[in-house]
Amino acid sequence: MPKTLENFKKAFPDAWSSYEQLKRACDKAGPLDAKTAELIKAGISVALEHEGGLVAHVSQAKKAGARPEEIYHAILLATGLAGFPAVLAGFAAAKKYLEG
C-alpha cells in the first residue's frame, strides 16, 4: 500500500493535498483527543476491512500514546458490527505491526 499511496500522491498532488486538508479539518472539528480519534479510525478500518488503513491508524494511535491493549480493544469493539472474521484479520494485522 505505501508504494501505491506514493504513486497516487505523485499522480494527483492537488487531490492528495485537498484530502489531507479535509482529514485535518475533521480531526480538529470536535473534542476528541488524537489517541481516541485514532482508536476510532482503527475500528472503522477493521469494519471496512482496510488493512492498510488499520496499520496506519494503529501507528498513529501508538504515536498518540495508545497502549497495545487499547488498540486491541478498539479492534475487538468492531466485532458486533463487522463480524468475527474481520476482527480476527484486523487483530492479526495489528499484532504483526505492534509485535513484529
Image (cartoon, rainbow, N blue to C red):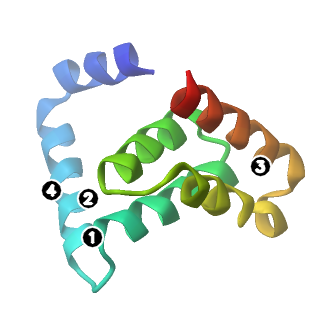
Foreground tag (3 vs 2): 3
Query: What residue is drawn where x is 28% and y is 16%?
Result: 7
Query: What residue is drawn where x is 59% and y is 40%?
Result: 50
Q: Secondary structure at mark 4?
A: helix
Identify the residue position indicated by label 2 in the image: 23
| Circles 3 and 1: CB atoms closer than 8 Å | no
Identify the residue position indicated by label 4 in the image: 21
Question: In the rendering, at what x and y percent does residue 72 appear?
Answer: 64, 53
Identify the residue position indicated by label 3 in the image: 87
Q: CA distance from mark 4 to mark 1?
A: 9 Å
Vertical arrangement, residue 97 with respect to residue 86, above or below: above
Which of disc 3 and disc 4 is earlier in sequence? Answer: 4
Residue type at numbered disc 2? Lys
- Whether residue 65 is visible to the viewer of this picture, yes or no, is yes
Could you tell whether 99 is left or right of 82 in the image? left
Query: What residue is drawn where x is 30% and y is 65%?
Result: 34
Identify the residue position indicated by label 1 in the image: 26
| Circles 4 and 3: CB atoms closer than 8 Å | no
Question: In the rendering, at what x and y percent does residue 82 appear?
Answer: 78, 58
Which of disc 2 and disc 3 is earlier in sequence? Answer: 2
Q: CA distance from mark 3 to mark 2?
A: 25 Å
